[in-house]
Image: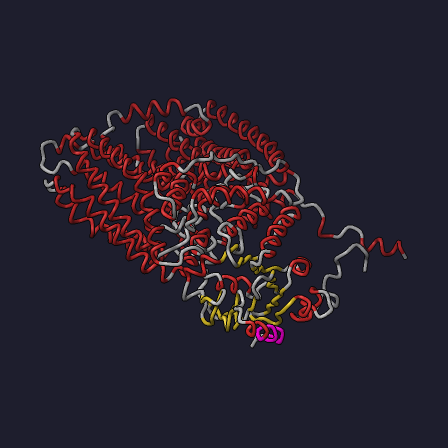
Amino acid sequence: MGSPWGKIWQSEVMSEGIPDSVRTRGLFKRFGQQVAVAGVDLVVPRGSFAGLVGPNGAGKTTTLSMITGLLRPDGGITEIDGVNVWRDPVLVKSRIGVLPEGLRLFERLSGRELLSYNGQLRGIPRQEVERRSEELIKVMDLAESADKLVVDYSTGMRKKIGLAAALLHNPVVLFLDEPFEGVDPVSANTLVEVLQRYTASGSTVVFSSHVMDLVERLCDWVSVMNRGQIVAQGPLQEVRGGRSLNQAFLDLVGVRGGGEEEGLTWLGSTPA
Amino acid sequence: MAGVHSGVSAAPPAAAPLGLGRTVGLFVRLKLRLIAGNLRGELTYRIGFLFTLLAAAAVAVIGFLAMSLLRLVPAGIAVDLGIVAFALVFLGWAVLPLLAFGLDDTLDPARLSLLPLRTRQLAAGLFVTSAIGPWPFASLVVTSGAIIGLAAGAGGALLGMLAVLLQFALCLVVSRLITTSLSRVLRTRRGRDLLAVAAIFVVVLAQLPNLVINRGLSGDWAGMLADTAAVLRWTPPGMAAHAMADGGPAALAELALLAVLALLLGLLWIEVLRRALVTADASTQAGGVRRSRGGVARLLPDGQLAAVVTKELKYARREPRGRVGWFASVAVTAVLGFSLSGQSDEWAGVEGAAALVVVPAGLGALMIGLQSCNAFGIDGRSLWMNSVVYGSERELRTDLAGRHLAVSLIACPLLAVLSIIAALLAGNLLWSLPATLTAWGVLGLALGVGAVTSVIFPYTTPDRLNAFTGAVPGQGGVAFLGSFAAIIGTSVLVAPIVVPVLFSLPWLSVAAVPYGLVVAWGGRRLAALIGFARFPELLAAVSRSA
């Protein structure tokens, strides 16, 4: 059950009586024969900038989908700020912001219309939606393309407008699935700045990524997933244990054999 | 040492340039493999492909027989029919590959631009791949029928064979020339949008025979044929058909001209291809949309309902699949009303003649309503945005109400106009009143039933409309069940109002609207109850990738 780091941290917090921002117990999901998530105990303390890392197919997306109420788990409990996601969806959904994997947005709305649709759907008064949208569009550097259809946006623009939509109702916890994948350095920098400002105020960000350098630079809390389970979890420094995060990750996940011994002898410009 | 090694490492054998023959062989195998690929994978794909094969075989056999039977028709008419048939085949070759763009990978030169081939080699390969497949084969067989039907004597048959081959070559080159020159536009989002809407013409064309028969436009067939053929006679396919029947020196001259034309077009195509391979994709240069202040939704109270109505109205306008649905409903209704009213003379004075107006209006309402039998399909993968907001059944109900309101805002005036037009055509404007009221009622019923089928049988609407199924592979069955349930459910519910209105109780149509409203409301309640409980499953069902 969980990692030693998770346990240490949990007992500390419990003594103070503050619930974690995100906590799952035994979260489980199978697709047909394949077990995608095999009992995940994820813990994210309030106010942290948390990274969920793991190789492809580790179950990161499935886990985040179940936490945000987009995918029904086959077992386990998920709590956000102590509230059960699947038992009290009204309260939870008003408190979280989500940017799922892929770039699934309403393609035939313009960026501005997408924001206003989101805001109104969440019951924010129209004037307030417009005010917040304008500011978000400006901060995200989307002013020029705000009236273009999302279907014509580039990857970076999509991630930015997606993040803007997720932030519009000022959620307490923000879940981002691969927010930096395929994003150019300039857009990535904008995203980082907005997110850092957001967590500085005490809100929580949970994001999944393969980019270890980025996680190392941004996060103060890391959860490492492999084959549907959390293999390590805790403050960045503890998980790293003196190594680089990349090395710690490779050690934890276990590196499969390299291609040095056989094959690929024809590759490269020097003759054998 | 260096000398020894350099001999070993230089010029790897696999990189030798391909000869023209091998290139063509390579492309033939590529195309065959692409076709064979249809036989693997999901069952719906395979059934669709089997259907294509059967349809192509049927067209080939029936077309061949029909063309060869031209021999039994008086010579003048036979030539005219042959000319028209050749021109139709040619037109088909020019237009239909455009609709398959993006489905057939060999049609888009950009997919092949990285191959280490000279443009001429590529052109030869592409030319051959065009000729392979069930439909090219069918068209070749059909035109060959004309050799039996039109050609005179052994010399004529020989010339006929030549004419058929030249016609085939011309078809291939022209179709390639058109797809290649438009490939840049077709790869852009706007081009694809336009093309998706163009598919609607196929729907309308399918209604044409119906229209012709019911309107009795049969006046002077022979004259019309002669006029058409006289014009088409001088087009390339017309010349090919004419040459077959002529068989003399004039025929030889015509065929020589066709050969030169095919060659010139081929050279032009190679030039266009050369340019298409090195010009950029223009899809990112899209313009913006007008910033609207919300339109109708401004009148609604601020909140979820207004948000959904605004979005749905925009989607009806901007989403090609939405536009196709609306155009199809209106076109089919209009054609139906027009052709039914052609019979109004026979019905004059008959009790229940209002049916001539009520039936098309009601069917129009049904068609519009049926588009909502998978209400979340077009949202597809974006539906998560609603899912992360909706925490209660009531919110899903509001969402459905917003969708219904948006559909009604477009459909109600439209149905009224259609009813008035149908009534004018039928000769009694008064009938438009029961027709409009009945149509509105039917719309309510269809929306109510559609809300329930949307949550019980949700499926993903593919980005590209497919001729065989409106669902992505693997969901054809669900899509069928959904539409079927919607049609049956609506038909059963519709009976209490439509039957009396048709049989001389038109005043009963007053009850249609409240009845429709109640059913729509009930449908939304039931749908929200079922749908909220299984929203994650619903989301997964509409988020399949095509």
Q: What span is in magenta?
A: A3-11
Residue B233 inside the magenta-drawn segment: no
Is residue B335 at all visible to an observer of this figure? yes
Q: Quadrant of the N terminus of chain B?
A: bottom right
- Image spot of residue B367 (x, y percent): 29, 44
The foreground one among B251 and B216 is B216
Question: What is the total number of numbered labels drawn onto the structure image?
Answer: 0
Is B187 drawn above or below residue B87 in the view shown?
Answer: below
Residue depicted at x 16% and y 34% = B431
Is B113 drawn above or below residue B45 in the view shown?
Answer: above
Is residue B44 at all visible to an observer of this figure? no
- Image spot of residue A270 (x, y percent): 81, 56
Q: Is residue A86 left or right of residue A139?
A: left
Q: Is residue B518 left or right of residue A117?
A: left
Residue depicted at x 68% and y 58% = A217
Most distant residue in the right direction: B1
The foreground one among B84 and A168 is A168
- Image spot of residue A154 (x, y percent): 57, 44
Q: Considering the whole magenta stretch, tell me its main secondary structure.
A: helix
Residue A6 inside the magenta-drawn segment: yes
The foreground one among B26 and B240 is B26
- Image spot of residue B382 (x, y percent): 46, 51
Residue A138, image quadrant: top right
Say how the picture is coloured: secondary structure
Most distant residue in the front direction: A16
Residue B345, image quadrant: top left
